[in-house]
Structures are given as C-alpha cells and as structure tokens.
Image (spheres, rainbow, N blue to C red):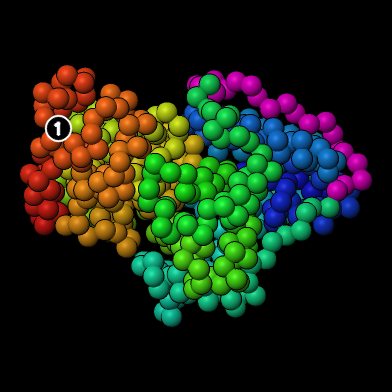
Amino acid sequence: MRALVWFRADLRTDDNRALAAACRDATRGVVAVFTICTKQWQQHDWADTRVEFLLRNLACLAEKLRKLNIALRIVTCPTFDRVPAALQKLATTLKCDALYANREYEVNESQRDAAVTRRFDKAGLSVHMFDDQTIIQPDAVRTGQGRFYSVFTPYKRAWAQRVHTDGGVKCDRSPRAQSEMICASDGIPESISGIDLNRGDADLWPASEAIALRRLSKFIDNRISAYKADRDLPAIDATSRLSPYLTIGAISPRRCLELACEANRGALTEGKPGPTTWISELIWREFYGHVLVGWPRVSMGRAFDEKKDGIPWRYDEEQFALWCAGRTGYPIVDAGMRQLLAEGWMHNRVRMITAMFLTKDLLIDWRWGERHFMRHLVDGDLASNNGGWQWSASTGTDAAPYFRIFNPFSQSKKFDPEGVYIRRFVPELADVPAAALHDPAKFTDGDRKNLGYAPLICDHAKARERAIAAFKK
C-alpha cells in the first residue's frame, strides 16, 4: 500500500497521528501533499503574516520529510471545491492507494473533507482520518445528557476526567522512515498573488517544529512557574508565545500538555499554580474547539447566544478606523492595536481590553473586530479568536456579563502600572508620567495635542451607560 499524507494545520513530523499511521501502514512508500487555496484563505480572512509564517514552516517540514524519504508535493487550488479532484488526480498519478489526514473542524473545512472522502471512495481509494488538532476530540466530551458543554468550568472537569480515563497524554513516536523516495518534492512558492509575504517577521516568529519545541522547553524551564502571577502583565515576557505554532500545527497540543504535566508532577488541574494555570489555558483552547463543533453557527458569523443577535450595534466606520489604527486616545487600547499591526500578535490581556473597548465603549459589532484580528494575527485561529471576541462582546458561551465592562484606565494601571508596555508601542507617550497614562484628569487635551496624541474617542462612563442600555433592550 502506498500512502498519500495530506498536511493542513499540522505542519510537523513530531506527534502527527496521520503521518505516523501512514508511515506505519505503508508498504510501498509515502508521499506528502499540501494544498494552497489562496482565494479560500482570503475569504476566511487569513492574515498575510499567517500565510508567510505558514510557508516558512512548510519549507522546514519539507526538509524534515526529505530525511524520512517522503516527498512533499504542492497542489494549488483557488478554493476548497477544487481540492477533491486535484487530490484524487495526484493520488492516481503517484499510484497511491490511500489518503491519510488529520481532521479539521470548521464548517467549510469539514464539508471539503467530506467531499474528498466521497471522491476517493468512488475511485476505490481509502481515506483514513484522525483527530489530532486537539488533545481530546471536540465532540468526545459531553454532559450526562449527551449534550455539548456551554460553560467552561464543568467542561474542564469532564475533560480532565476523560484524559484520566484515556490513560493520560499519549504522543505518537517519530514516524518511520521510508526505504525510498517515490518522487521529487515541489518547491515552496516564494510569492502568492494577492498575498504580501513581506509582512512576516522571521526574527520574531522563526519557523520549524524544532524552534517550537525549543520555545516550549524554555518556557517550561524558565517561566511556567511564575505564569499565574505574571501572565497578565504585557510589559514582560511571561507567556509561551506558542500560539502561532499551535495554529499551524508546528507543535502538538499533546506535547505541550505532556511537558506541562511533567512540570506539575503529573497533575492536570491541581498542583503548582503556574503549570496548573497554563494547562487551564490549553483546556480553554480545547473548549473553544468543542464549541465550534457543537454550535457550527459560530463559524458563520452568528452569535452563540442567539438572543444577542438583536443587539443594536453601531457601524461607525470612522471610529472603527481609529480603533484599528490605535488612535482612540486610550493608551492601553492604542498600544495593543499598534502591537497587532507591528507584530501580528497581541498579548492576551490586551486582546480582551481592546475587544471589550470596541464592543462596549464604541458599541461596534464584534464581527468587525473579529475580522480585523483575523486579518492581522499570525496566530489567527477561528475557534479561539471567535471565542475570545464573543466572550468580550457578551454574546458567547460562558461570556463576560454585559454589565461587566473594563475601564481601560483601571486595566492599564493594574496590568501596566509603570507604562512600560504602553510606551513601547505608543512612542509619543514616552515622556508622560505613569500616573497620567492611567488618569485622563492628569493628561489634558492640551497635553495630548502638544504630543501629537489622539484625543479621547469617547467618554468611558457615558459609553458604559449606553452599552448597558443597549444590552438591556
């Protein structure tokens, strides 16, 4: 049997279930394939920086596969509907008997995979799909009534119990090398029409699964013990910064959990504060994948809480543009939005602050913000991004109550007290005293004008009253 392994959001050889199974089952060799679907990616609001990061990691994957005598072929289709025929043609040309892949759970991706399966079945070719993107497959954790969980805490308990029942974390061994390479590999594209591949930052986000594993090890060794205490402080390097690697699958979530549990003396939900808190963040990632499968409407621009579809959102393009540019006059908000533009990434605490500011202070539709984030994030993941936005907008599962609205000045005083993070990304505020950064009464309109800094886009107290009134309706 000759296997064709279809890589998607799993660009690694370590702990890759589809690849491991294909290498184990094949008797006549293995060929790998990756599909580039530019128009579909653009329809899904993939950031240019995410595509650039993906291609650099794809090149690293090709080299890893070469050492296993596995060629990587590139198939280009504008949209998903062309993929089934293209993959079947490649399988037939290379005399492959079976397709191996790890499942993707978004609506369009699931429909594409079903179409591929039908096409291969009709051609007499087998398809083997595996659950690999999450530690526990998204539909495997259910309530006693067989329903999907809509609240995180009981989901977390059930999830941990399921991991325990399954015998703990199980990572696949390295795939078996093949005796010979079936064909030549294709080159990785150096340009893609409509995508600006100069937007990426190879220094900030270096590629390869080896780099991802090294980052994980360094985080476990040096920072995870202080993670609970420091994770909300954007001025310091306290987080793992693994989210881009998890998004494209350059590292396995199981590998992350395995090392975190080792640091936590084998415990999942109890133990040392730092590792326990980081493991909880991994479970949040699992939870949002669970919600994506249980309520597919969140993949299609719909609120999880359907009652919230009637909120009278504002569609003020001028204010939205100021928010996007980091010109709201609220220092912590502007710092976060400028970090997004500069790095393709934003600290998670600041993601919550900026998202709640858009949806509550400006009362602008969360879908506008969700789309803007996806179009700029190197770690843009539909499930996590949507889950975070709907949490901030109070439209999602287990969301923040609508009346709990962050005060941006209180948030910056608590989490960036010396203004180090703010000054890093808003240089016109470099000489403003920390106390003034967190208190508009000490930072007058005249001060702002003299520094070339934006005036306040709104009055927070009045905006809060407006948001509460809108949600009460």
Q: Residue at 25% across / 46% down in the picture?
A: 413
Front residue of this view, candidates 446 and 336: 446
Q: Secondary structure at mark 1?
A: loop
The percent position of residue 461, horizontal first and vertical second, equals 9, 46
Front residue of this view, candidates 451 and 248: 451
Magenta span dominant secondary structure:
loop
The percent position of residue 115, horizontal first and vertical second, equals 59, 48
Q: Residue at 76% across / 58% down in the picture?
A: 173
Instruction: Say which quarter of the image contains residue 335.
Output: top left
Q: Residue 110: in sight, yes or no?
A: no
Instruction: Examine the rendered structure and indicate whether residue 278 appears above or below residue 356.
Output: below
Q: Residue at 43% across / 59% down in the picture?
A: 228
Tell me the quadrant of the picture where the C terminus can be found.
bottom left
Q: Residue at 36% across / 67% down in the picture?
A: 151
- Callout 1 crowding tier (Cα within 10 Å): few <14, some 14–19, many ≥20: some
Amino acid type shown at disc 1: Phe
Instruction: Say which quarter of the image contains residue 295.
Output: bottom left
187 in the magenta segment: yes
Q: Is residue 440 left or right of residue 90?
A: left
Instruction: Examine the rendered structure and indicate whether residue 2 appears above or below residue 324.
Output: below
Q: Is residue 390 left or right of residue 473?
A: right
Front residue of this view, candidates 120 and 141: 141
Which residues are drawn in magenta?
177-197
The percent position of residue 314, horizontal first and vertical second, equals 17, 39
Instruction: Examine the rendered structure and indicate whether residue 182 appears above or below residue 220.
Output: above
Q: Is residue 17 left or right of residue 405?
A: right
Q: Residue 210: in sight, yes or no?
A: yes
Q: Is residue 358 left or right of residue 252?
A: left
Reading the image, the residue beneath label 1 is: 443
315 in the magenta segment: no
